[in-house]
Structure formats: C-alpha cells, structure tokens
Image: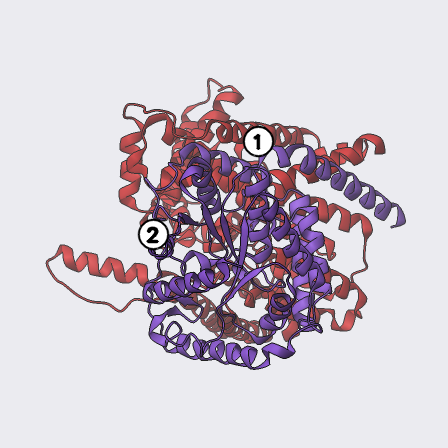
Amino acid sequence: MKQILIKAALIITLAILLNLFLYSAIYTRLLPYSWGSNELLDKREFLRRNAAKYNSLFIGSSKTHNQIHPQIFDEKARENGLDIRSYNCGVGGLTPLESLHIYENLLLHDSLSFKYVFIELDWIATIKVENLNSVRSFYWLTPRNYNFSISSILNSTVPIMRSAWGLFHYSLNYGENLMNIGKVHEYFKYKNFVANQKFLPSDSNIMYNGYIPMSHKMNSTEYSLYSEVVGSARLAVRNYPDLVDQHLSQPYLDRLQHIISISKQRGIITFFIVPLQWKYYQYEQLIPIINKIKGARTICLFDIDRYANIYQVDNFADPNHLNEKGAKLYTEEIFNQFLKLYGK
Amino acid sequence: MLFNSFAFLLFFPIVTIFFFILSHKVRWLFLLLASCFFYMFFKPEYILILAFTIVVDYFAGIIIASTENVKKKKKFLIVSLVANISVLGFFKYYNFINYNIVDAAAYFGYEIEVPLLTMLLPIGLSFHTFQAMSYTIEVYRGNQPAERHFGIYALYVMFFPQLVAGPIERPQNLLPQFHEKKVFNPDLAVSGLKLMAWGLFKKLVIADRLSLMVDQVYNSPENYRGLNIVIATLFFAEQIYCDFSGYSDIAIGSARVLGFDLMKNFRNPYLSKSISEFWSRWHISLSTWFKDYLYIPLGGNRVSVPRWMFNLLITFLVSGFWHGANWTFIIWGGLNGIFIMGEIFIDKKRNTFSIPTIIKRSTTVILICVTWIFFRVNTLKDAGTVFRNIFSNSQTFAFDLTQFLLAVLLIIGLEIIQFMDEKNNVMSKIKTLPYLIKIPIYAVFLTVLLNFGIFNNSQFIYFQF
C-alpha cells in the first residue's frame, strides 16, 4: 500500500510539473489574456482596431453592458462642451477581478489609452454559479489574480460560508487553470473564433458602442426578488456612515489604488461606478472601499430613494438589471455625477 | 450524476473511503443511499419509478421462488414483466406510439389529437428495467434463489456504477457479491482507477472531440456531401464506441475499486471479422441479455432455417426498439439482423474459398458504419438526405484541419493500442516496465487527458436509452 501511494504521489507530482511547464511556456504565449470569453475577445479586438475612435471606456458586468448607453453619455457630454467618445466594454457576468484583469491588460498589453475610464465595482467573493468550472471562471486566474482574490476574501468579513465557498472555488478554478484543463480544445476554439470573426459591428448583435439593451419584463417571482434588492440597498444607505473599517478588504483597496496609479501614469482619469447590489453583505465590502479610496472619483448609484426615478419598478428588466428606459436614466445620472466630479 | 463531472470526482472518493471504513453489516445501506443520491442528482422524483419496480420485482421474486405451483410461478413472472415493460413502455414509447397513430390517421384522412407526455425519459430506464427483469426470469427458471434482503435486492437494481448505462448485470454474478465481505485490495483499486482513467480518456479526449465534427454534419446533413459525410460517419462509429465503452470502463473500474466485479461490455468490436462477431464484442451485456431471454426462448438456431432467420430478425428489431423510440433505431436493428442473415447465407455457400482477414474486418466496419447512419440521424428524412448526399459530388473539406488531423491521430493511436491489446494485455505490459519508464508514461497520460480532454460535462450517448 505504501509503495502504491509513493508511486501515485510521484505520478501526480510529475504530471503537475509537466502541466506547470506547459502553462507557463506554452499556453501563456498561445492564448491571449482575454481568451475565456468570446464576447470579450470580440470587444477587445474591436477596441484594438478602432482605438482612435474612442477616448473613454466603461468596463464591468451586465450592469455596465446592459445599463450604460455610450451614445446618451456622449451626447450629454457634447451638450456640455466635452469631447467624449465612449465604448461600453461590459460583458455579462464579468467579475470585479476579471474587470481589473482586462483593464490592466488593455493598458499594458494592447497599449490602449483613454481620457476617462469608468470601472464598475462589485464585491469580491463571488463567481456566478453558471460559470463555475468553466473556462470563464478561470482564464483570468493568473497566479497574481489568484493571490489577490484569496487575500481579498481572507481580509474581508463576508459571512464565513460565503468566504469558504469563494476560497474553495477560486482555488479549484485556479488549479484548473494551472493544470490546463481542456486547454487544447480552448485553443482550437480560440483559433476558430479568430479565423471566423468579422469584428464589430458588421456581423455582431452588439451595437458599435458595445451596449445591448434589455427588453425582458419582470414576472411575479422577479418582483419579489426586486423587493429584496430594494431592501438591501435601503439598509446600506441607512448604515453608510458606519460601514468603514471593520469590513475593509485591504488587498482590494490596494489593487484599486494600483489601478488609479497606473491609469494616472498614462493620463487616464479613473471613475468607479457602484451600482445596486443584491445583498447587504455586498455593500458591507464595497462601502468601506468607497469611503477609503484615495484620489478616486466614485459614482454611487445604490441610493434607491435618491434615484427613485431610475429605480422605479417599471424601469427594470429583471430584479438586477434596468431595461432600456431605466438604462437611459441610469446613464444620464452617471453623466451628471461625472460632471460634478470632472473638475476635481 | 455524470462520471465526467466534478461532482463525481468528489462523490466517488468519499463513497469509497466510507464504504471501507464502515462495518460490513451496514455497507449495503450506505451503498444504497449513495446510489440513491447518485440517481437523484439527475431528477429526484424519478427514483419513485425505480422504487415501484423494485418493490414489485422483489415480492414477485419471493413468491416465484417459494411456490411449487407452476401456474402461480408463471403468473407472478408475468406480473413482474408487465410491471417493468409497462413502465418502460409508458415513459419511453408512449409518445412514439401516439405520433404514429396520429400519422396513420392523417394518412387515411382523419385528424386526431392525442395527449403527449412532456416529461423527460427517466435516465437509464431501459438498463435497470432489463436488469430487474433478468432477476425475476432467473428466479423463475430456478437459476437464482430469490433475494430475501430487500435492501440488497434494491442495491442490485440501483448499484450506482452501472445504474444508468450498464453493464446490464445478471443476478448470479452481482447479487452474491453484495453479501460478501469486501476488504480493500490496493491492487484491485489501482487496476480499477487505471480503467476509470482509460474510460475517461476515451470519453473526454476522443468521443467528445469527434462529436464536434459528427454533430456539425449530422445536425444539418442537407449542407454536406460526399467525403464530408463519410468522414462524419466513420467518426461517429469511433465516437459511439469511445463514448459507450468509455462509460463501461468507468463503471467497471469504479465497481472494481469498491471490490465488485462487473461483466465486460466491449471486446475491441471493430476488430471483428463479421457482423455476428461484432455483436459478440459490442455491448456484450445487452447482446447476451437478448440472446438468453429472447432469441433462445424463440427457438434460437435449433429450428427450421426460415424460423431461425425470423428469430434473428425479431431479436435485432426488438434490440433496435430498445435503443430508442424512433423508426431510425428500428431500421438500425433490422439492418443488423439482415446483415447477419446474409452472412449465414454466404457462409453456407462458401466452402471452397477463404476471404483474407483484412477484407473481412474492413467489410464488417463498412457495414457497421452503414447501420450507424440510422443510429445517428435525427429523423428518417435525415437518413434519406445522408444516403442521397453521400454519393453526390464532393464539396470542399468541411472540418478544421488541425482538429481533424488530431482526431485521426487519436483514432489510429487507439486502434493500435486495441490491436496490441487483442494479442497481449497492454496494461500488464506497462506494469512490467521499470519505474523510470512507467511513472513518466502515467504522468504523460494524465497530462494528455487534462490538456486534450473536452470538459463540458457532455452526457454519455447511451444515457438517453
């Protein structure tokens, strides 16, 4: 039995070493940093090919992708004498760490530059259930990003079960990335995608500015979930001043400061957008960050009573996303806050 | 729960550890609960269907064994068979029969409406009902004593490694094993794990890769012609083999780790020299089931030639119908029967000359591939399209060249290994190699499995049956 265990350990160790070699020597060269999502690959390629057309960028999850209308934003800017030509680089399910990974690489790898960048903030300990054990949940988990995600969770005070879940899944997904699970197939898929893609806007349903409106109407179950979101947002606003140090995730804060700093070096002004969240504990992590972050321009849009015109139930496509009408009001409000922060 | 899922990767070691930690007295209960959990992972409520047939067959078995009255024995055998076949018929064939009634009525100018079942087919239904039926038949024949322990009988039907896609076990082989006290055997466990890894390789690296090209053609056959259809058909032949034999390897391997011995389900079928040999190497547990419980009771080959041919054809038609409620499967079964009948006819005439083995093997593969077309097409209309287009002018190569070459390389590699395995057991050859060679071989195999596998939780083809 002992001999069998030694043999198994040797085989596994050798396989791990082989895979680590393949990971660092082969795949990091073969696959681009955005390989896990076709939509992201598409948007990134479009941005690279049309870099001169845009001077501002929105990046984040579906709350960016489906809620921020660059055309409206640009028109408002023009009315105020500002030259803003923005692109919505939001992608459904983009986690905050993924957003930061993409943004950093757009600057470092693709040498893109902007005047203004708007990054959606979200809490850390989350991977969308439908994305678990998929390339989408691990393609961006580089050693640095994994280290960051783990330390962010360990340094936060989210409920223990949620932390444990987050730690387990980030570790599992990181392992999948390092062990190159299914990477040959992913490489073929990527090659095929590149060979067949037409790049926006010719054949894509994504509008030239990257925005897609949501037209779905809420059903009765979704109405009750909507009430839950409203409840969490109200509680967060009420406790806003108290949510300071005790829930602060220092690694998250440090990473955001780093983002501000590398952006500043390239003459980019960074704005963070905080949308509505599902749960109160999400606010517990986000609000201390907002309160602490230095040199940031934060656009907070989670005060459901203050922005009652935006968050009317009729403006929602589902409990978590605004419809086209809501997106218009949401974008206008982002612009209004941007204008206030602009001179700072 | 799928064998190629992350859930199974957690489930299996946990079950193995607890199985050997627990006392022998409660192991049956633990395995039964684990099997229920495994099955309920798909759709929990369907366990009630299993429970129904288990209860009926358990009591039928006891009554059949405890009475000397032949009429009563027969009556309870019929009760058991009707219960099983009714469940199978209702869930699997209800819509098929109704569609055909509607079509037939429409043919004669009548428009009728028949309510259809909208629920999914309970997973593995054909497999566990056949396994359950083999129990009552064997008890009736006096080859197997009735199992008095309800839990162990339930475990016989529900044993998770072979619950959803076989091998379809016989009570004589499996039931006594649940009574035996299992002791953890490291060599057996290692051999089981190797078999599981090999099965996963066949499924994830070969079958799922081939399915990409097969689906491309067979999901819209009207867009493909000539060589592209030939390639897709050959690839499907290899895909279904790797998919199903891969599943069987994982099933047999996981049972072996727990100390159970399940019957072999495949023996390099594409090396067969005839269609009848193919059927003695392909899905052996089902072929022998049909042989024992349908073909031989019909009279087998110990009857007049016309009756023998009839028995063959009926057996293969039923086998086709067992696979799926679609005319395509019935034709597939019928074709296999016709080919075997043809072989018998040729064999009777051919006394003076012999055919080289390579010709025999190639002809068998070609004929089997023709039958696979009916197995794979989605509709009978698609089958017509495939046969029309396969002989029409060729078109440009439809597949990604690198994917295609990789697939060809994998198939050749697999067939070489199978061919070598036919003569000498490859696994035992590797076992005799020195550590310095053996350990890197296993590590490279593991790396290839991880890198080249397609991990999209795709279902095994035979799950639909």
What residue is pinned by disc 2?
A: B326
Is B130 located above or below residue A54 in the figure? Answer: below
Instruction: Answer whether labels 1 and 2 touch (C-beta < 8 Å).
Output: no
Q: Chain of mark 1?
A: B
What's the residue at 49%, 79% (across, down)? A228
Camera-nearest residue between B188 and B80: B188
- The circle drawn on residue B52 is none
Is residue B230 visible in the rendered image? The answer is yes
Cα–Cα span, label 1 and label 2: 32 Å
Q: Quadrant of residue A97?
A: bottom right
Query: In the image, residue A159 lies at what x, y percent?
Result: 67, 73
Viewer-nearest residue: A210 or A294? A294
Please tell me if label 1 and label 2 are on a single chain.
Answer: yes
Q: Amino acid at mark 1?
A: Leu
Along the line of sight, which residue is nearer the eye, B186 or B359? B186
Left or right of A307 in this view: A149: right
Hey, what amino acid is under mark 2?
A: Asn
Q: Residue at x 16, y 60 (%)?
A: B105
Mark 1: which secondary structure?
A: helix
